[in-house]
Image: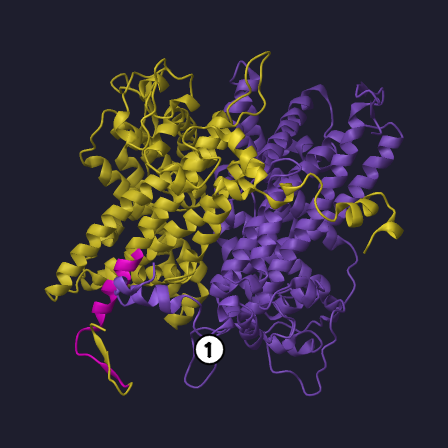
Chain colours: A yellow, B purple
Amino acid sequence: MRVSQVTREGKYAQSSVPRQLVYGTMVYVRQTIVRDASSALARAVCIATRYSAVRRQFGSKKGTLETQVLDYKTQQARLFPLLASAYAFRFVGEWLKWLYMDVMKRLQANDFSTLPEAHACTAGLKSLTTSVTADGIEECRKLCGGHGYLCSSGLPELFAVYIPTCTYEGDNIVLLLQVARHLIKTISNLGSGKKPVGTTSYIGRVEQLMLYHSDVQKVPNPDYPGPEVLLPSAFPCCSARLLVKPLAGDIPCPFSYHLGHFTVVSDLTSHDFAEDWLKPNAVLGAFEARAAKKLVACAQNLSKFTNPEEGFQELSADLVETAVAHCQLIVVSKFIEKLQQDITGKGVKHQIQLLCSIYALSLLHKHLGDFLSTGCITPKQGSLANDLLRSLYSQVRPNAIGLVDAFNYTDHYLGSVLGRYDGDVYPKLYEEAWKDPLNDSVVPDGFQEYIRPMLKQQLRNARL
Amino acid sequence: MRVSQVTREGKYAQSSVPRQLVYGTMVYVRQTIVRDASSALARAVCIATRYSAVRRQFGSKKGTLETQVLDYKTQQARLFPLLASAYAFRFVGEWLKWLYMDVMKRLQANDFSTLPEAHACTAGLKSLTTSVTADGIEECRKLCGGHGYLCSSGLPELFAVYIPTCTYEGDNIVLLLQVARHLIKTISNLGSGKKPVGTTSYIGRVEQLMLYHSDVQKVPNPDYPGPEVLLPSAFPCCSARLLVKPLAGDIPCPFSYHLGHFTVVSDLTSHDFAEDWLKPNAVLGAFEARAAKKLVACAQNLSKFTNPEEGFQELSADLVETAVAHCQLIVVSKFIEKLQQDITGKGVKHQIQLLCSIYALSLLHKHLGDFLSTGCITPKQGSLANDLLRSLYSQVRPNAIGLVDAFNYTDHYLGSVLGRYDGDVYPKLYEEAWKDPLNDSVVPDGFQEYIRPMLKQQLRNARL
């Protein structure tokens, strides 16, 4: 209504205000969707992480308890990248809020220069974060085993309510095609001297990036302080009881921002080498080069078509992959930028650093084909990243509960028996089971007349 | 009960019958799960494919209809690999039925030699097929756009009822670890001269496979007959009306096995080169080498641990990937074996060949990192596979409806407005909407008293 008018007689009148202004609203709505993605994913991850600490299965040695499911590497390899994503999306969401403010300020000053980039950026991030969150919620359900399927786990409803985001406000695949179109336009305009701005500025360095080969290697480095881990007893006021026996007199302080409580102690295991993949520049370089090389390959393939639109249709699956590579680069780079800011709370920054590495390296492992086929990294470097991931998972493990407590969700909001703050899962599950109408009577209505005769193969007696 | 006893007093008595016999039942149950996976995935794919032919969006040129969604490459790249998977799982399911019979025959003759391999095989295939099917149903829902979210699309219920299969009868990740354990055992036993059997027999050629480098290239080959496509009008008794205007006097013959109706016509586009990736041996070689090389890498990493069990825990995420590579090899090889059998119906075999190539090459593209990092293929060969995939999608496109009609599902069984055989989607969607209780009245109960005042910001008048 701000830029167009409909008369009382129902006639539509276009305004003289530039069309671009309507994009402002789109940018606004999409940045809220990104922030919501973070909080939905955080909710699922919180439930799955807490329950994985409560649930024990197998691995019992004479008389000892069985292993906490959270200690299994397969559980960690599925759960911790999602935990890292929840944090990543929160930080990119914060930045998007700034981006929106910046765009609005510029629009009011009739400066439309950053609008196309901001539009592509929010479209792409809406697509990326909602797809990962929708799949992530379902993965968290599976991580809870059979109990995740129960309504009382809170996960089925969260999934059902969340998943339309992949389709509304722009179908996620269609949005990625819009991003790809913007990227192709940006790289095509380089020749005319138009400098890419904001999240596309790396495209300005495309010639340099085409020559990129990662120099990551495993070198001994005695100066490297080594990864730090938190002793569980160092944060008694978190739900540390899920990890260790509570300290005497430990009173939980519910719902405070637990992330402030981290205290750092020296590493429990020995790490006598520096791992280059922990360096932000090593990660950023590889992600930039991958995105740039994929974009150039697409642009080259497109140029073989006489009709560009036909080429765009034909190559659209590749263009979608290129857009994803670009969007992942944005999230990784904003995560790294966040770490350059002041982060208060002793030890908190280090925890976030671990998550940042997990986020980036798990993506690198998942999209290894991209990084290898573009020659950004070697198979050996890919394998180093994978080895490092395992070690990062071990380092996050003692703090996993603290890191989800830090989301500061009340039990009421989580709505999950499995994700209870106090970890008192099994008695409450039993109480929930009593609420099932099937349990109103010992033998459900109709069993004697209809079901029992069938089970006993006395169909003649069944009242069907 | 066949192998153990519980006395009337409640005491458990182990029988003298070999423990292995109980695995027979597991093999039976899991092979039925694989066949069910095929039919659930086929159901979702049938709905999404039919609706993608009905649904039109964008791309209208003056006065013409908009583009059928099924014609978009991004839609094809998501849908057709699932269509191919539905066929692949059907064929591997048929083979598993034979495997079960074979195992039972052997057990009765006290031959336990193939049981561990058969057990690992069914465990792995249960895991692979149910994971792909669960994710595939959700992907099909997204492929139907906003309408896929409606209950009347049939997809939400299909998803909700299907997904527990990923957890029951063995959690899918735990099963893959069992497969990995079997594979590690198989390769460790090579030294003692124990020859791998059945689906693991390729491990016997491990030394040869370690040297494998694909020789796939793009070569002109005038002898190659070129891909064939089916003219839509050649199968009037399928629901060809979704593709083209029906022929005069066209009477649908509902629910017959439509696959028999394919007729082959010569290619519509020019293909003057042979693509090596269409050769079954090129595909099989790459999949065998990938599985073998991943297995050897795991075995080598495991040998670095003094405690093998600790190593198995630590490397479990890699072991899961190795098991997946092995299971995908089984499905690909059984698909190729199926094509060596007689397939009746003119042109049917060619359609199945296309799907086989799509199944294998889309996996190769998805797991490109595996194939590149193990040196099985080069980036150039990976790129050729990707180019070929696009062309295969175009070739499957005219027959897509025929290929899902061939599943022979009744509308009643599909339970989907979007997947109706007659394609009469929109009037029926409207009818379904009338069934929503919200539509019982023009203005829903409570709107005037509670909601309107809030919308009009007259909270004082609201009866809350």
> Foreground residue, B226 or B220?
B226
Q: Is residue A29 above or below residue B332?
A: below
Q: Amino acid at mark 1?
A: Glu
Task: Kindly report the secondary structure that dominates the magenta region of the rendered protein.
Answer: helix
> Foreground residue, B446 or B155?
B446
**x%, y% of residue A434?**
58, 38
Q: Quadrant of residue A268?
A: top left
Q: Which residues are magenta?
A: A11-30
Q: Is residue A212 above or below residue A120?
A: above
Q: Is residue B139 left or right of residue A207?
A: right
Q: Is residue A371 above or below residue B66?
A: above
Residue lying at 72% horizontally and 81% vertically, measured from the top left: B251
**x%, y% of residue A75?**
49, 32
Residue A68 seen by the camera: yes
Tell me, yes or no, whether the highlighted magenta stretch contains residue B136: no
Residue lying at 17% horizontally and 60% vertically, measured from the top left: A104
Q: Is residue A171 left or right of residue B48?
A: left
- Could you say whether the residue bearing mark 1 is in a helix, strand or loop? loop
**x%, y% of residue B185?**
66, 24
Label 1 chain ID = B
Q: Is residue A279 above or below residue A240?
A: below
**x%, y% of residue B382?**
50, 49
Tell me, yes or no, whether the highlighted magenta stretch contains residue A26: yes
Q: Quadrant of residue B119?
A: top right
